[in-house]
Structure formats: structure tokens, C-alpha cells
Image (cartoon, rainbow, N blue to C red):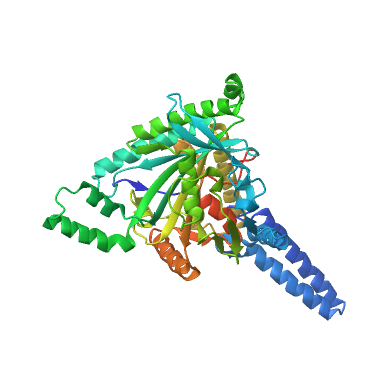
């Protein structure tokens, strides 16, 4: 049976597993310790005691990890959060209070505030596609509604065939489409309460004998399941970099219509590739459909109907404490899966998270293909660094742990996969849980955390980053990755 082997999260730093921030903090601690010793020798006991406590604090903070991150990684988060709250930027007011109340704007807080709606019409003159153009980031985003059959109930051969076909799609997205302007993509799977009970409605509409015993049994079954019935939806979101498409856009006229024409051509290719992999699609979301999906994520109590695009954003949103985000009628908490399973897992290892947990939740995998040359440089840099660490530890007679051996093997495995033609990706897995009350939210988050733990994943609440986490994890916008800068992948 096919199994997945995820590489461990790298614990290697700049020097012997420590980052430069940790090294600087530890050095500052040692300097404080030396100064404290000199002050103590000079008879300044109170000053020496203060510096001694400072030295111990700095050394401890330099070596300590809290919730999957180094303390030095928490510092910029804490500082930025404090500044944000001091400037009262932790609250957002949209709707009639939005800065640009025009109908073409999508009013969202933070870095996502730069989106504008751009409606595109296909060559047939009938098919409409909703595009989101971010003028500051020079990107265009579209979302494809996907459907599919149950993978768990399929035969092993069918499961293997589907996964192989999907792997081909991933390679296409990272090579052919990346060269054509695709900068990142995301899979967003959400489970929401089926308030309209589609199963019961389907039975009512399709039944030919409404008075029979079979109908009454099915009607009772669907009615009893109504309180816990959920609807599952999957969206493939694609983001194109307009700077890479500038030549084609200029040739087409350089206008918004030209942008729509060029992007629609790329989207048709992505949809064809997905369909060839055996995944059925309902087409790219129209502007009103896209707005309705965004609105239902932001305001869970809203009616799931097509709405005016400029009303898709939140009316009011704010960060509550360090770990929750309140938005209109919902309150959410976003978790970052920072460690994938260390043990081999079967093909259906994410099924419990996606289909078997109760509550309103969204699972998002956002990925960015790394250019081939940059991927080769990154792998070479990792191999050289690992070799250097091994030589240094041998000279210093330091112990080499099994975790370090596993990370070194993972680097070799990535090198072999790239040599075989596979694409290297930067990716992040986010899980956003939404509820109506804080008590219900805590209950649902505990349930999701247990499921993640049983699957072998390690997740952490995005403390101090819930506003950004919600936009990245709950909304099909393919956000959440730091920009790829320089020669580091």
C-alpha cells in the first residue's frame, strides 16, 4: 500500500543548530555574566545580582522553544502585536465605514485590503469568472469549485491511480503553469452545517413514491441526521503574477479586459489539467459566487446566496486576546500545522480531519512552487551545511542525534526527487475553526487538535497572528506564505 513519508521540520540553524538570533542572545547573556562577575569582585553586589539575573534570562531565552518556535521568533510577533494594539489597528470596520466604499473593492483588513473585483467573460460570451486583482502585489486570484467521489471507499488501485494523476497535476502547476505566471495555489476544504439539509431536499425532489415504506424510512433517517449534517466543499485557488504576464497583457491591449483575457486562458488550462486527473469541477466561481463564499466564511449566520461583491467583507472584526478572532457573527481560531507526521501514513490520512470532525472548520494547504534553479541551489546549500555541521561536531566530539540523521536523510531524499523531475514546493497547512460562542470554539478546537495529534501532526495556535491567520486559513485567497526573497527557498 502506498504511504507518504514527510520530511521532518528542520531544526538546523546558522551555527550548530542555533539561529543568529539565538547566538546573539546567548552571547549577550555571557557578556552580562562576565560583567556581573567583575561588578561582584568590585563590591557592587546589587548591580551584579541584577546583571546575573539578566544573563540567566538571556541565555534561557536564547535556548528555549515555546510552542514550536524559538523565543527569538516570538519577539517580532509580540512587538508587532503590541504596536498594532497601541495604534488601535487590531479592530476593523467595513461596510459603510470602509475606506473605499466603491463597488469594485473587496473590503478586507490588513494586507488583504488591496483586492479589487474584476469580472471576466469567456470567449463564448456566457461564462463569467470572478477575478480578484491585488494592485499592490500585482496579482490576480481565481477560485475553482471542485467535486469528487469518496477516496476512502475506492479500491486501492483506484486510490493509487488518482494520487498518481494528482501528482502529475502538482508537477504541471509547478513547471508549465509556474513558467506561465502561476505564483502560488491553495486547496481549501471547508465543512459547514447543512442548514438546508440537501439530502432531505434531494429525497423530496426525486422520490417517485412518497407514500411507500422506503420513502418514510429514508425521510426519518435524513430528518434525524439534520442537526449534525455537514456540507463539504473544496476550492482550488490560483494566483497569477501580472508582472510575469506583462508581455502577453501588453500585446492584448494592456487594459483590464486584456488582463482578464490572458488570465482566463491560463485558468482554462488549469481546469483542464484538474479534470484530466479525474477531479470533477463546477467551474471557476463567478464574481457573485466568489463573494458569497467569502461572505459565508466571514459571517456564518448569513444566508448562503449570491450577494453584491462589495459586501463580501466583514462589517466588524477584531482580535480578541492573543488567540481568537471575532468577525461579524462568528469567532475563529486558526492553527498552524508546523510538523507533519513523522511516521509513514496511508493515502487517506487526512480523512478524519476533513470528514469526521464535527463543527465548522476549514483546512487550507497553500503552496508556492520553487523555481528549478533556486531549488537546486537550496538543496546544495542544505547538503553543504549538513556536511559542515557533521565535520564541526566530529571535531568538537559532540553527539549527533537521531533527529539530525533523519533530517540529513530527508535532504538527500529531496535531492533525489528533484533529480527525478519533481517540483520543490514551499507550503503551509492551516486549520481554521469557527463557532458562534467562545465555549463552543474551545470545544471544537480541542476536537480538531486531538484529530491532528492522532494523525501524527503537531499544531500550534497562531498567537498574536489570528487576524492574518483567518484570512490565510479560512478564505480561498491562497495567502499565508512569506514572499520568496533572494536565493533562499
Inspect this view and state whether residue 113 appears: yes
Q: Position of residue 356 (x, y in %)?
A: 34, 58
Q: Position of residue 264 (x, y in %)?
A: 49, 29
Q: Position of residue 174 (x, y in %)?
A: 48, 34
Q: Quadrant of the C terminus?
A: top right
Name the side, left or right, on which 51 lies relative to 348. Answer: right
Q: Among all residues in the image, which is located at the extreme top?
A: 251
Please tell me which residue lies in front, 360 or 405: 360
Please say if 127 is above or below 18.
above
- Residue under the point 28% across and 50% down: 152
Name the side, left or right, on which 210 lies relative to 111. Answer: left
Name the side, left or right, on which 221 lies relative to 276. Answer: left
- The quarter holding residue 11 reads bottom right
Please tell me which residue lies in front, 90 or 278: 90
Q: How many marks?
A: 0
Inspect this view and state whether residue 13 appears: no
Q: Position of residue 438 (x, y in %)?
A: 50, 69
Q: Among all residues in the image, which is located at the extreme right?
A: 42
Please tell me which residue lies in front, 259 or 305: 305
- Residue under the point 53% across and 29% down: 260
Amino acid at each position: 500500500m502506498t504511504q507518504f513519508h514527510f520530511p521532518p521540520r528542520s531544526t538546523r540553524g546558522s551555527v550548530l543548530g542555533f539561529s543568529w538570533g539565538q547566538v546573539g542572545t546567548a552571547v549577550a547573556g555571557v557578556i552580562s555574566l562576565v560583567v556581573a562577575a567583575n561588578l561582584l569582585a568590585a563590591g557592587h553586589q546589587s548591580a551584579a545580582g541584577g546583571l546575573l539575573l539578566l544573563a540567566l534570562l538571556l541565555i534561557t531565552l536564547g535556548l528555549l522553544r515555546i510552542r514550536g518556535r524559538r523565543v527569538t521568533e516570538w519577539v517580532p510577533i509580540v512587538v508587532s502585536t503590541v504596536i498594532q494594539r497601541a495604534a488601535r489597528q487590531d479592530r476593523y470596520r467595513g461596510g459603510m465605514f470602509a475606506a473605499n466604499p466603491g463597488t469594485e473593492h473587496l473590503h478586507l483588513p490588513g494586507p488583504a485590503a488591496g483586492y479589487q473585483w474584476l469580472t471576466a467573460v469567456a470567449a463564448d460570451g456566457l461564462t463569467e469568472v470572478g477575478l480578484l486583482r491585488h494592485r499592490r502585489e500585482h496579482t490576480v486570484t481565481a477560485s475553482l469549485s471542485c467535486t469528487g467521489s469518496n477516496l476512502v471507499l475506492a479500491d486501492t488501485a483506484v486510490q493509487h491511480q488518482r494520487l498518481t494523476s494528482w501528482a502529475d497535476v502538482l508537477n504541471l502547476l509547478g513547471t508549465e503553469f509556474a513558467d506561465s505566471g502561476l505564483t502560488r495555489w491553495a486547496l481549501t476544504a471547508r465543512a459547514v452545517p447543512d442548514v438546508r439539509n440537501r439530502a432531505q431536499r434531494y429525497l423530496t425532489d426525486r422520490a417517485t413514491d412518497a407514500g411507500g415504506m422506503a420513502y418514510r424510512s429514508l425521510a426519518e433517517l435524513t430528518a434525524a441526521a439534520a442537526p449534525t449534517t455537514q456540507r463539504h466543499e473544496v476550492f482550488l485557488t490560483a494566483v497569477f503574477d501580472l508582472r510575469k504576464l506583462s508581455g502577453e497583457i501588453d500585446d492584448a491591449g494592456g487594459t483590464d479586459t486584456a488582463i482578464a483575457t490572458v488570465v482566463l486562458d491560463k485558468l482554462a488550462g488549469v481546469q483542464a489539467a484538474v479534470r484530466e486527473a479525474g477531479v470533477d469541477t463546477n467551474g471557476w466561481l463567478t464574481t457573485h459566487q466568489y463573494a458569497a463564499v467569502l461572505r459565508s466564511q466571514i459571517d456564518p449566520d448569513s444566508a448562503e446566496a449570491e450577494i453584491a461583491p462589495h459586501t463580501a467583507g466583514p462589517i466588524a472584526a477584531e482580535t480578541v486576546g492573543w488567540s481568537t478572532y471575532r468577525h461579524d457573527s462568528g469567532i475563529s481560531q486558526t492553527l498552524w500545522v508546523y510538523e507533519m507526521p513523522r511516521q509513514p501514513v496511508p493515502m487517506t490520512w487526512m480523512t478524519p480531519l476533513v470528514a469526521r470532525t464535527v463543527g465548522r472548520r476549514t483546512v487550507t494547504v497553500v503552496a508556492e512552487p520553487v523555481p528549478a534553479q533556486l531549488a537546486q541551489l537550496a538543496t546544495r546549500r542544505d547538503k553543504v551545511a549538513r556536511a559542515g555541521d557533521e565535520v564541526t561536531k566530529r571535531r568538537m566530539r559532540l553527539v549527533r542525534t537521531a533527529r539530525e540523521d533523519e533530517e540529513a536523510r530527508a535532504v538527500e531524499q529531496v535531492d533525489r526527487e528533484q533529480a527525478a523531475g519533481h517540483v520543490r514546493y514551499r507550503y503551509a497547512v492551516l486549520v481554521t475553526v469557527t463557532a458562534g460562542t467562545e465555549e463552543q470554539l474551545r470545544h471544537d478546537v480541542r476536537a480538531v487538535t486531538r484529530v491532528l495529534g492522532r494523525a501524527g501532526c503537531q499544531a500550534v495556535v497562531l498567537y498574536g497572528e489570528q487576524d492574518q491567520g483567518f484570512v490565510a486559513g479560512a478564505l480561498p485567497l491562497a495567502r499565508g506564505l512569506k514572499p520568496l526573497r533572494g536565493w533562499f527557498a
